[in-house]
Image: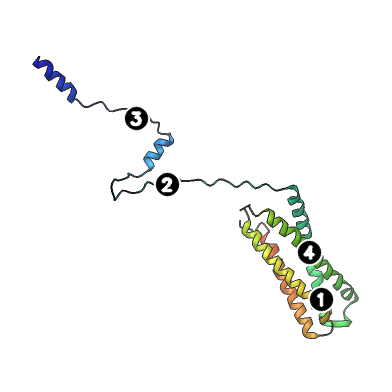
Amino acid sequence: MLLHALAALLLAARPAPARADTTHLDSPWRQDETLLPPVGTGRDAAPAPADTVRRRRVVVEYSDWYARRLAVHRWASYSMLPLFAAQYAAGQQLLDHGIDAPLWARRSHGPMATGVAALFTVNTATGLWNLWDSRQDPAGRRSRLAHSLLLLASDAGFTATGLLASRASNSGSARQLHRNIAFASMGTAVLGYAIMLPPFRKD
């Protein structure tokens, strides 16, 4: 009996065999356990890091009218630089020679100014409408906003240029102011145009 009791005690005192880790190394649970640092206990316990939340891609749907307005906006923009060049040439002739300027300059300056006004009216309407429709799209947002602000500044400048046109025919100082504001407006518009070109557009 004594021997049986000793044998039972020895069997009970033997350490249990180590359990095999059945978790696969590729399991996400296994990876999480190896990546997490040990968490202490008590007051000095380090807080467990929060789970990393991946941002979901924002899906923005555009209507067919967005594409149509964009096409109108782009095709109108293509006429901007040639129109600016022709208007500069005519305006410079009028500034230098006054009533003795060439006939083509005197006859074309007014209609081309009307063309600039029509161009910026169309592009302001289509551009602001599409800017509102794309407000949820993060791609290219900074470029769109910078482009819009610069072109709106050009709108204001060309409006002031038109208001000075009647005074410019009778006053040398008004002609210089008319010319300077027109140049500044053209420069702002060209800069806003360049921002949207692929080599300069960063986002």
User: Which residue does the image show at 46% across and 46% down from the upper left?
Assistant: 52
The tag on residue 91 is 1
Q: Residue 131 location in percent, x, y?
A: 69, 57
- Asked whether the beta carbons under mark 4 and mark 3 sit within 8 Å of each other, the answer is no
Q: Which residue is mark 2?
A: 50
Contact between labelled residues 2 and 3, with CB atoms less than 8 Å apart: no
Q: Which residue is mark 3?
A: 21
Q: Is residue 158 above or below residue 34?
A: below
SS for callout 3: loop
Q: Earlier in the sequence, mark 3 or mark 2?
A: 3
In three-dimensional space, the C-alpha distance between marks 4 and 3, rounded to whole angstroms, equals 72 Å
The CA span between labels 1 and 2 is 66 Å
**Which residue is under mark 4?**
121
Depth check, mark 1 against mark 2: the one in front is 2
Disc 3 to disc 2, C-alpha distance: 26 Å
Q: Quadrant of the C terminus?
A: bottom right
**Camera-nearest residue between 38 and 100:** 38
Q: Earlier in the sequence, mark 4 or mark 2?
A: 2
Q: Residue furthest front?
A: 43
Three-letter residue code for mark 3: Asp
Give left or right: position of 131 versus 13.
right
Q: Amino acid at mark 2?
A: Ala
Q: Nearer the viewer, residue 105 or 5?
A: 5
Quadrant, the N terminus: top left
Is residue 129 shown left or right of residue 22?
right
Residue at image position (72%, 69%) is 154
Outermost residue, left side: 2
Instruction: Name above or below for residue 62 compared with residue 100.
Output: above
